[in-house]
Structures are given as C-alpha cells and as structure tokens.
Image: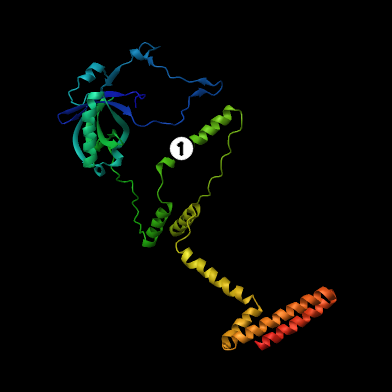
C-alpha cells in the first residue's frame, strides 16, 4: 500500500488507545470514461469556472466553500472553520460499539477503505485491534468526519489489514414500502421445487472468475476504430417473449442450465441407461443362429450324453474340415461347391445326432 496515496490522516480511538492511521481507498474503477467533443471538428468541450459577478474565469486557488441560506444569502465557510468543529471525530475514527456482522444491513454499506498503520508506533495497537476483532467475530461501529461531514463506518478484518466500510445513517436508507407487488399471488410447492432445482443447477461461482464483459467489448470497439477497421458485429439478441407459463419457464431454465453445465437430469444414469443395455442383449443373442447355441440348448436337455456327443461332433467337424480342405486344393472351384454341400449335409446330420 506504500505506492497508494492516503486521502485522510488521523487516528482510531479505541477506548483509551489511540492508533495513528492513514485512510487509503480499497477499491478502484476500471470503467472507460469518455470526453465530450464538438461533433463537427472533434474539439474538446470544457467547463470553465466563471465568477458570475465579475464574468471572468477563476483559478482553483480562488475557489472556496460557502453555504447558501434559505433567503439566498451566501455564508462563506473556510477550512479553518471546519477544523474547529465541536465534534471528537474531526480527525479521529471513534469506535462506539462492537456488534455481530449480520447486524449490518448491506443497504447501508458504501465506499470501502483500508486503514494503514501510521508508522512504527502504531504497529502494536493496530495489531491488538485486529486480533481482538478476529477473536470476537464482530465488527466495530465507528464515527468519523470526512469531506465536510460526519459519517458512520464499520471496521472489519481483511487478511492482515483492517478495512473500513462507509455506512449510511439509518435514516438515509429508504423503506421498501410500496416496492413489492401489491397483487395477491399463490406460489405452489412444485414451483418452489423447480426454483430450488434451478438454484442448485446454477450452483456457486468463484467471484474471481467474473469480469466486466461490457468494458472488454468497448475496448474492442475503440481498438477497431483506432485502426480504421469496422467495429465488431452485434450478436443477435436472444428471442424474448412473455412468460405465459411459469412452470414451463422454470422447467426450460433448469434444462438449459443443466445442458450448459453438462449435468445429466437426475435419475438418468440409474433408469435410462440400464434399460438400453437390457434391450440390446436379447436382440444380439437372437441374431446369432449358430450351431454352438443349439448345441448348448441340446446339452442342457441331455446332460448324461453331453461328453460323448461333444466328442463325436468334434471328430466329425475335424474330418469334414480336413476333407473340405483337400477337396479345395485338388479339385478347384467347381468341386468346392460340392464340398460345401457335403459339409452342409454333415452339419445337418450332426444336429440330429445332437
């Protein structure tokens, strides 16, 4: 954090303990900013600060603060006036309470800062506060003054550092009254089950994997324009329409989410796949009209004669094979056909013998 400029210097007041700290921005914006130009000649459009009484532009050093009263009168306020505010938080982050983190409404949370220890003397009390927050599993609620007003803050541990989130005052958070639909609706259990299934299918996400796709697309457009190329084509928008059937929309959403993540529907492996294998096996067996199948069936019926029949069949098969081979070598194509017929007859005889 040494290369980051601090925006506020002060101290944390922790009971009788004072911890010198520097306030450093914990976040940064990567948004692409645009300049305003004159479309005819690309000239920059600038805002000039002009004194309306003298009708001339004034420098930053000539500009101060003032409060405009209800009657329009101007009351100048100097930095010295602000430094003498009758509050203890002018240069101090004053811790007023320690509460569980779940007590803080996320609607109240604003800008985030890191609190850097202000020098070596602050190391000991800084570490003490950090470890106390860790062990208590609580956050500290504090008041501090920044940019001309007193603010509310929440201190918590981030890694080995203490971070502070600016909080809105409770009366600055609007009530949600009138925001929710005032039409009475009934939600069925099956609809909730489908919503739960969709949430489970989408699952969790590592926030580190998320990025600003709009900024990346904008950078591509700028790069194309700078090189004189045509900007990328706009993808076709997804077909939209009115949701006429909430159940159908939920079912389609669950199905689409599972397909995108390669997750099979529940029960598919246990019910569908075994049935397919079971149907394929009988067809494969019926398609084999082989002699060995009939031999097996015959052998089950005549168990005592199985050995002698097998020997006879084996001898007959060898003799037939030997004669068929000799006949093929000496006679040629014409006699080979006759040998096949003889083999067929002997095979039929063998079936009857079996």
Question: Within 10 Å of the Cα at label 1, are there few (<14), some (14-19), or many (20+) other Cα atoms?
Answer: few
Give the camera-side residue of 55 and 311: 311
Q: Total number of numbered labels?
A: 1
User: What x and y, as percent, mark residue 150?
Assistant: 24, 28
Residue 8, compared with residue 212, is above or below; it is above
173 relative position to 207: left or right: left
What residue is shown at x 80% (from left), y 75% (from top)? Answer: 328
What residue is shown at x 34% (from left), y 24% (from top)? Answer: 2
Residue 37, compared with residue 239, is above or below; it is above
Residue 40 lies in what quarter of the image?
A: top right
Q: Could one spot residue 242 in this view of the protein?
A: no
The residue lying furthest to the left in this view is 16
Residue 87 lies in what quarter of the image?
A: top left
Kindly identify which residue carries mark 1: 212
303 relative position to 129: left or right: right
What residue is shown at x 54% (from left), y 24% (from top)? Answer: 39
Residue 326, compared with residue 83, is above or below; it is below
Q: Could one spot residue 83 in this view of the protein?
A: yes
User: What x and y, as percent, mark residue 266?
Assistant: 45, 62
Give the camera-side residue of 254 and 77: 254
User: What x and y, as percent, mark residue 222?
Assistant: 54, 30
- What is the image's colouring? rainbow
102 relative position to 52: left or right: left
Give the camera-side residue of 251 and 171: 251
- Screen quadrant of the N terminus: top left
Give the camera-side residue of 204 and 61: 204
SS class of the residue under badge 1? loop
User: What x and y, as percent, mark residue 19?
Assistant: 21, 27
């Amino acid at each position: 954090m040494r290369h980051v400029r601090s925006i506020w210097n002060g101290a944390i007041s922790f009971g009788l303990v004072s911890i010198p700290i520097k306030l450093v921005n914990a976040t940064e914006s990567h948004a692409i900013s645009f300049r305003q130009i004159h479309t005819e000649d690309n000239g920059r459009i600038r805002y000039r600060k002009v004194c309306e009484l003298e009708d001339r532009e004034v420098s930053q050093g000539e500009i101060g603060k003032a409060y405009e009263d209800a009657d329009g009168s101007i009351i100048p306020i100097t930095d010295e006036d602000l430094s003498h505010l009758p509050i203890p938080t002018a240069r101090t982050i004053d811790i007023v309470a320690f509460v569980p983190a779940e007590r803080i409404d996320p609607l109240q949370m604003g800008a985030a800062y890191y609190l850097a220890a202000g020098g070596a003397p602050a190391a000991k009390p800084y570490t003490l506060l950090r470890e106390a927050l860790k062990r208590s599993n609580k956050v500290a609620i504090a008041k501090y003054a920044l940019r001309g007003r007193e603010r509310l803050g929440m201190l918590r541990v981030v890694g080995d550092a203490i971070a502070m989130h600016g909080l809105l005052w409770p009366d600055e958070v609007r009530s949600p009254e009138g925001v929710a639909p005032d039409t009475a609706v009934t939600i069925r259990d099956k609809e909730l089950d489908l919503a739960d299934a969709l949430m489970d299918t989408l699952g969790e996400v590592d926030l580190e994997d998320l990025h600003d796709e709009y900024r990346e697309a904008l950078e591509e457009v700028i790069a194309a324009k700078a090189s004189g190329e045509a900007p990328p084509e706009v993808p076709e928008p997804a077909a939209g329409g009115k949701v006429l059937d909430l159940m159908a929309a939920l079912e389609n959403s669950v199905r689409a989410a599972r397909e995108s993540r390669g997750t099979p529907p529940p029960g598919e492996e246990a019910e569908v796949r075994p049935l397919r294998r079971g149907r394929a096996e009988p067809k494969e067996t019926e398609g084999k009209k082989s002699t060995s199948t009939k031999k097996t069936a015959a052998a089950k019926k005549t168990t005592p004669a199985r050995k002698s029949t097998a020997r006879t069949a084996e001898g007959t098969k060898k003799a037939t094979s030997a004669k068929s081979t000799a006949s093929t070598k000496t006679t040629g194509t014409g006699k080979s056909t006759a040998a096949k017929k003889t083999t067929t007859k002997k095979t039929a005889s063998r079936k009857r013998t079996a």
